[in-house]
Image (cartoon, rainbow, N blue to C red):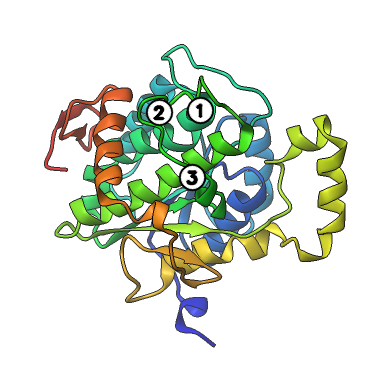
Amino acid sequence: MSAWKEKRLDGKVAIVTGANSGIGRATAEELLNRGAKVFLACRDLTKANAAADEMRASGEAIVMKLNLQDFQSIKDFVVDFNAREDRLDLLINNAGVIFTERTVTPEGNELTFHINHLGPFLLTHLLLDKLKASSPSRIINVSSEAYSMGRIQFDDLTLERNWSSMKAYGQSKLGNIFFTQELAKRLKDDGVTSYAVHPGAVNTDIGKDFADKYCCYSCFCFCIRPCIRTPEQGAQTSVYCATAEGIPSGAYFMNCKVANLKSVARNEEAASKLWQTSMELVGLAPNVHAANDGSVGYGTV
């Protein structure tokens, strides 16, 4: 058996976003079973508390409010977390959405991009000092093979001119990969590594809007049902990246191994430009992140 499958996480502290159901919940349960203290960072506290009640037989599961659509909620979460915990070993940016209609947030961002990329981008930055202080620590960003259908439309990030569900989702998932690559470059001397993962086609609630709105999508899902993974199976690559030794920071993983990226995701100039653009969109001046007490201060990333 591979060593990572037996790796214990006793004494480690993890945050898993979107951990009340699906891949996030399965990931949190696996980390709990290995001895980690796990914070379930969720928007719906009712569902999160119900999930945590079922998980606590396996370990210490703590629910905290986090709404990735709301930048203030992210800042409040970090302040509260920093007041509770002295360390953070694993940050798993798992939560993700896809929509059937285009929506623009009050800040002027396309909603899919806002939740899937900008929210995790801000959350990670505000937790960087804690991650550095706990090194070696890891950041895992759940992406998707849908990245290959995305392009970072710097002249039209809201996709006002040509929006579709998959273009918006693909752009956000490509953003996850670029973010992972830039983190690896910028944190290479800080003991913090980053990984992007594709969980595979998994039976979760993320496509519920499509199933409700489009009969053809429901039929498609029914036809491919034998190939769809369970949340537990889908969580394995995230768990692998949380526990395996000697894996390359900044890489993209699928089926618990490094996967080759298509050319669209091998653009260092676009990755760097997205980093700077995202800093502006989340309201952080260049090289600003949060101190351990949750306050915002100047850093080196």
Q: Looking at the image, which residue is at 49% across and 43% down?
A: 150
Q: Is residue 1 above or below residue 251?
A: below
Q: Is residue 261 above or below residue 92?
A: below
What is the three-letter code of the residue carrying label 3? Lys
- Identify the residue under disc 3: 173
Asked if the residue at tag 1 contacts the one at tag 2, i.e. Cβ–Cβ closer than 8 Å, the answer is yes
Which of disc 1 and disc 2 is earlier in sequence?
Answer: 1
Question: Where's residue 256, x and y in %?
Answer: 51, 72
Q: Which mark is residue 67?
A: 1
Please tell me which residue lies in front, 33 or 226. Answer: 226
Q: Looking at the image, which residue is at 37% across and 63% down?
A: 251
Separation (CA) of disc 3 from disc 2 = 20 Å
Q: Residue furthest top?
A: 106
What is the three-letter code of the residue carrying label 2? Ile
Question: Where's residue 56, x and y in %?
Answer: 61, 52
The quadrant holding residue 43 is top right
What is the three-letter code of the residue carrying label 1? Asn
Q: Which mark is residue 74?
A: 2
